[in-house]
Amino acid sequence: MFESLSNNLQAVFQRLRGRGRLTEADVDEAMREIRRALLAADVNVKVVREFVDRVRARAVGQDVLKSLTPGQQVVKIVYEELTELMGGSQARIRMAPKPPTVVMLVGLQGAGKTTTAAKLALAFRQQNHRPLLVAADVYRPAAVDQLKVLGGQIDVPVFSLDGASAVEIAEAGLRDAERRGADLVIVDTAGRLHIDEALMAELESMKKVVEPQEILLVVDAMTGQDAVHVAETFHQRLEVTGVILTKLDGDARGGAALTVRAATGCPIKFVGMGEKIEPLEPFHPERMASRILGMGDVLSLIERAQERIDLDKAKEMEARMRSANFTLDDFQEMFRQVRNLGPLDQILKMLPGMNRVKGLENLDLNDRRFRRLEAIISSMTPQERQDPGILNASRRRRIANGSGTTVRDVNQLINQFEQVREMMKHLAGGGKRMGRRQAMN
Ligand code: GDP
């Protein structure tokens, strides 16, 4: 997610931090680089200009440049302004004073509405709500079946009505929710390939009839500025109450995430991170800013861990990670532990500094890769696992043969292990630096 933006900004900061003193000219140069990085990430030109102006004014004003750590102060300002740009703090779903709460999901075809409807239902079910999904996408017949299948998977009822119009379905769905005692109604509406009048008119009538607490616009983050344009148009007609950005797991450059709020005034409320039906994740501007700036997203990681990991084991793990002698045995255990947390590359990138480690994508923890990793490490002698430095070419060949893999696989694993170990050392020895970073937050 936002990889090149993140790398570019971190490179700017590294140069800034590297200097003891900063002049106004240094700040100007950094601002030019930040501007370039944001534009390359497809952030709206006007938004970029205003952003850079705000950061610059704060950076050269007051006592920033005279402070003991001017570079650090500038990073802090960028962090705060990025957070602000994305809405400041988490925007939650408005619940109806008297249930059921009605949420209309709108957006173009292919944006991920149906998938998102199921993820949203799952997120609320996990918080002990009783959601009902309403299949009102009558133009794409497969959408109704798709929603029924997804509903079945997550054990959430799905209301549909053959032959009725979208507005009729929504209305009947609401009555069905009351009958069932559902407290949250999620209406999956029709999309089109492009915005058109008929669609907008239909959504407007639906809005009048069901009086939703929330109209959430689902947009595909990969489409960058197009997503922002779509958001502006929907917002003008429907007064959208929030945006859900999907496909942030892909290689979206960041433009949509950083522009939508400033361009439309609509907060981003959730983000979609994959095709699998997992609970939809709330959007936290401060955590996203922290991730973009390579400061990690330890809070989200902790939340996930609390949900899915054995705490005692996690404590043990932490002690090992902090001890400077991190071995392949620990590496394997780390894999076993975090496997529960989701795709490893996503997890590791939540740790400070980790998003600079190359090739994390290859650490994908799907079953096949995981078995290969287990096989390779199991084919090593205990001594090799403790001290990978002794793994010469002939040992690597033996391990590849023993594990049914190739020498390339073995080399790759050892390289990744070395990278992670370097990071661990950095974390273990970098107490002071970490402290300062955290103090910033
Ligand atoms: P709809 O036409 O808006 O209802 O879109 P769908 O829910 O059918 O999604 C369109 C495609 O996008 C499907 O292939 C989904 O699996 C995929 N998709 C939806 N959300 C995400 C996401 O967050 N990440 C990724 N990678 N794919 C997604």
Image: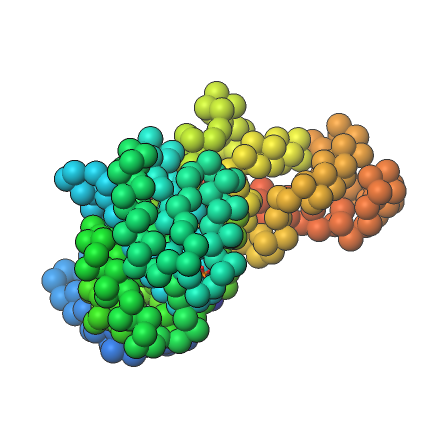
Splitting the image into 4 quarters, where does residue 222 fall? bottom left
Going by the image, does 303 lie left or right of 371? Answer: left
**Front residue of 336 and 104:** 104
Give above or below for 431 relative to 364. Answer: above
Colour approach in the figure = rainbow
Instruction: Find residue 197 and report its horizontal and vertical position in percent.
Output: 30, 77
Residue found farthest to the front: 163
**Front residue of 238 and 53:** 238
Which residue shows up at 23% across the image and 66% down it? 204
Q: How many marks?
A: 0
Going by the image, does 18 lie left or right of 178? Answer: right
Could one spot residue 300 in this view of the protein?
no
Which residue shows up at 18% across the image and 43% down it? 96
Which residue shows up at 46% across the image and 43% down it? 151
Could one spot residue 50 in this view of the protein?
yes
Instruction: Find residue 79 and report its horizontal and vertical position in percent.
Output: 28, 57
Which residue shows up at 27% across the image and 52% down it? 171
Residue found farthest to the top: 312
**Front residue of 14 and 289:** 289
Instruction: Find residue 2 and report its horizontal and vertical position in percent.
Output: 44, 62
Going by the image, does 188 lie left or right of 93? Answer: right
Residue found farthest to the left: 62
Instruction: Find residue 403 and report its horizontal and vertical position in percent.
Output: 82, 39
